[in-house]
Amino acid sequence: MERPADVRVGRSSAGLGLFTKEDLVKDDFIIEYIGEHISHEESDRRGGKYLFTLNDDIIVDGKDRKNKARYINHSCRPNCDAEIEDEERILIRARKRIKAGEELTIDYGKEYFAEHIAPYGCRCAKCSEK
Ligand SMILES: [Zn+2]
């Protein structure tokens, strides 16, 4: 397993966010999105914004604070990607060069955006430019 990046939770424009403490290059492994493995039915029952689809059978419920990756905010122009490895693990990787101190962001997709972002307005850097 690759070494995770040195990250910290801090204040961002959207409440708390996750920031890198070191320079990263494209495809660098940053952090694993961890949590309880539950069924799709259980996921629908629980709801919430920290549910991450792993495969056709399993959803990862990452609401526990031990899952630091839960602090990664949505951006419509993200600097990270979530990658499913062997249908078993959710790995967050840099999609471009990221400097130490920058906030880490992911595009969580249409469904997440419609449910958790659109009602409040997106506060990502790209949308704030408008
Ligand atoms: Zn946005």
Image: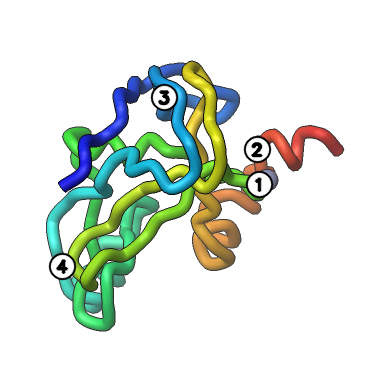
Element assignment for label 4: strand
The disc placed on residue 77 is: 1
Element assignment for label 3: strand
> Toward the viewer: 46 or 27?
27
C-alpha gap between disc 3 and disc 4 = 29 Å
Residue, disc 4: 38
Q: Do the residues labelled 1 and 2 touch (CB within 8 Å)?
A: yes
> Toward the viewer: 118 or 28?
28
Element assignment for label 1: loop
Q: Is residue 16 visible?
A: no
- Which label's residue is closer to the chain start, 3 or 4? 3
> Toward the viewer: 25 or 56?
25
The disc placed on residue 20 is: 3
Give, as a three-letter code, the residue at label 2.
Cys
The disc placed on residue 124 is: 2
- Which label's residue is closer to the chain start, 1 or 3? 3
Give, as a three-letter code, the residue at label 4.
Ile
> Toward the viewer: 19 or 21?
21
- Which label's residue is closer to the chain start, 2 or 3? 3
Tell me if residue 112 comes above or below residue 7 in the rendering.
below
Q: Report the residue at 86% width, 38% height from top.
A: 130
Residue 36 image position (x, y, % from top left): 13, 56
Count the labels in the image.
4
C-alpha gap between disc 4 and disc 1 = 30 Å
The disc placed on residue 59 is: none
- Which label's residue is closer to the chain start, 4 or 2? 4
Q: Do the residues labelled 4 and 2 touch (CB within 8 Å)?
A: no
